[in-house]
Image (spheres, rainbow, N blue to C red):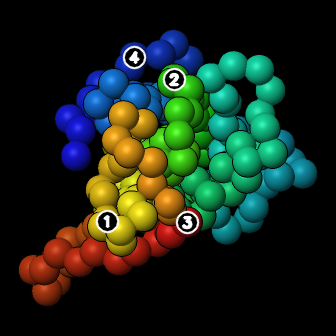
């Protein structure tokens, strides 16, 4: 597994932001705004509205990138408590900071984006969380060997996926639990 790069970016006009990367690539930057005022049409009476936007490294989003906001939203939602901020908006923007190089790198970028988003929520502190989400890419080589965090420099993998886990600590039972919240 490559070294992890984590930094809290102090972006203007955001409540929280963070940069996350696996080794030299892939890297992602996430910024969080909220809870803020929501448009009347998007307002939910019992909880905050959660919007996710994904920006590619360059150009306009490709077809696969258009599905990323819903992937990130579904991976993060189990740990976020939106009921404490009804009738507000929580807006997350995730930016790819490196190009995709191979089959394993696409899953690595998704994992980097999910991890950067989690760190942005932790940095903001304005949205209550029940735990944290940690994501990792896993690839399978032709011989069946599993590779955690496959890089573009390693030999090509025949299959790759991203796994995100929700990690929480139950104070009443003094135990830590982890459950898988996303697989691709």
The answer to which of marks 4 and 1 sits earlier in the sequence is: 4
Q: Which mark is residue 97?
A: 2
Cα separation between marks 3 and 1: 15 Å
Residue at the (17%, 75%) spot, across then down: 176
Point out residue 112 in the picture as x, y percentages from the top left corner.
Answer: 43, 41
Which residue is label 3 attached to?
Answer: 184
Single out the mark in the foreground, 2 or 1: 1
In primary-sequence order, the first of circles 3 and 2 is 2
- Label 1, secondary structure: give it: strand
The tag earlier along the polypeptide, 2 or 4, is: 4
* Disc 2, SS: loop
Near mark 2 (Cα within 10 A), the count class, few <14, some 14-19 or many ≥20, is many
Marks 3 and 1: CB-CB under 8 Å? Answer: no
In the rendered image, which residue does mark 1 sit on? Answer: 146
Name the residue located 55 percent from the left edge and 66 percent from the top edge: 184
Question: Mark 2, mark 4: which one is toward the viewer?
Answer: 2
Which disc, if any, is residue 154?
A: none
């Amino acid at each position: 597994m490559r070294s992890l790069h984590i930094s809290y970016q102090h972006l203007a006009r955001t409540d929280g932001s963070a940069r996350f990367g696996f080794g030299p690539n892939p890297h992602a930057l996430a910024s969080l705004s909220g809870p803020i005022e929501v448009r009347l049409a998007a307002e939910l009476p019992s909880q905050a509205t959660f919007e996710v936007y994904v920006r590619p490294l360059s150009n306009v989003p490709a077809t696969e990138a258009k599905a990323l906001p819903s992937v990130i939203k579904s991976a993060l939602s189990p740990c976020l408590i939106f009921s404490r901020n009804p009738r507000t908006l929580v807006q997350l923007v995730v930016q790819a900071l490196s190009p995709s190089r191979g089959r394993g790198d696409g899953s690595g970028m998704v994992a980097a984006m999910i991890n950067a988003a989690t760190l942005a929520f932790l940095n903001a502190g304005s949205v209550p969380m029940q735990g944290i989400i940690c994501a990792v890419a896993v690839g399978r080589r032709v011989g069946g060997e599993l590779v955690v965090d496959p890089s573009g420099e390693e030999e090509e993998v025949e299959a790759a996926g991203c796994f995100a886990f929700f990690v929480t600590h139950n104070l009443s039972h003094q135990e830590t639990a982890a459950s898988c919240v996303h697989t691709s």
